[in-house]
Image (cartoon, grey):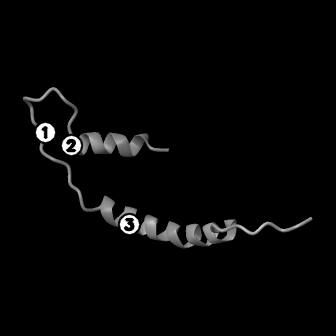
């Protein structure tokens, strides 16, 4: 059997990149999640709005 050489990156290179990139994505998610605040509800609109009540519901619905 002969060993094939690939011009692209190998699986090990991908796993190294994924292992170093995952913590960076987690930190960015935590930092971005704490910056936005819910808006005051617009009682004239019939669309779903981003309020503290809807955020609490979505937080409780996550699993």
Residue in the picture at 57% in, 71% down: 17
Q: Secondary structure at mark 3?
A: helix
Question: Mark 1–mark 3 contact, CB under 8 Å?
Answer: no
Residue in the picture at 57% in, 67% down: 18
At which x and y percent is residue 34? 29, 61
* Cα separation between marks 1 and 2: 6 Å
Q: Residue furthest left?
A: 44
Mark 1 lies on residue: 41
Which of marks 3 and 1 precedes in the sequence? 3
Which quadrant would the N terminus be assigned to in this image?
bottom right
At which x and y percent is residue 5? 75, 69
* Res. 28 mark: 3
For label 2, count other residues whose C-alpha is less than 10 Å away and answer few (under 14), some (14-19) or many (20+): some
Which of marks 2 and 3 precedes in the sequence? 3
Mark 2 lies on residue: 51
Q: Is residue 26 above or below residue 39?
A: below
From the viewer's perspective, is 62 left or right of 52? Answer: right
Which of marks 2 and 1 precedes in the sequence? 1
From the viewer's perspective, is 26 left or right of 58? Answer: right
Q: Secondary structure at mark 2?
A: loop
At which x and y percent is residue 45? 11, 29
Marks 1, 3: nearer the viewer: 3
For label 1, count other residues whose C-alpha is less than 10 Å away and answer few (under 14), some (14-19) or many (20+): few
Residue in the picture at 31% in, 44% down: 56
The quadrant where residue 2 appears: bottom right
Q: Secondary structure at mark 1?
A: loop
For label 3, count other residues whose C-alpha is less than 10 Å away and answer few (under 14), some (14-19) or many (20+): few
Question: Mark 1–mark 2 contact, CB under 8 Å?
Answer: yes
Of residues 5 and 33, which is closer to you in this image? 5
At which x and y percent is residue 40? 12, 44
């Amino acid at each position: 059997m002969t060993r094939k050489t690939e011009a692209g990156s190998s699986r090990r290179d991908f796993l190294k990149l994924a292992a170093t990139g995952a913590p960076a994505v987690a930190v960015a998610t935590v930092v971005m999640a704490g910056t936005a605040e819910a808006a005051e509800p617009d009682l004239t609109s019939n669309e779903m709005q981003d309020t503290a009540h809807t955020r609490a519901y979505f937080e409780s619905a996550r699993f």
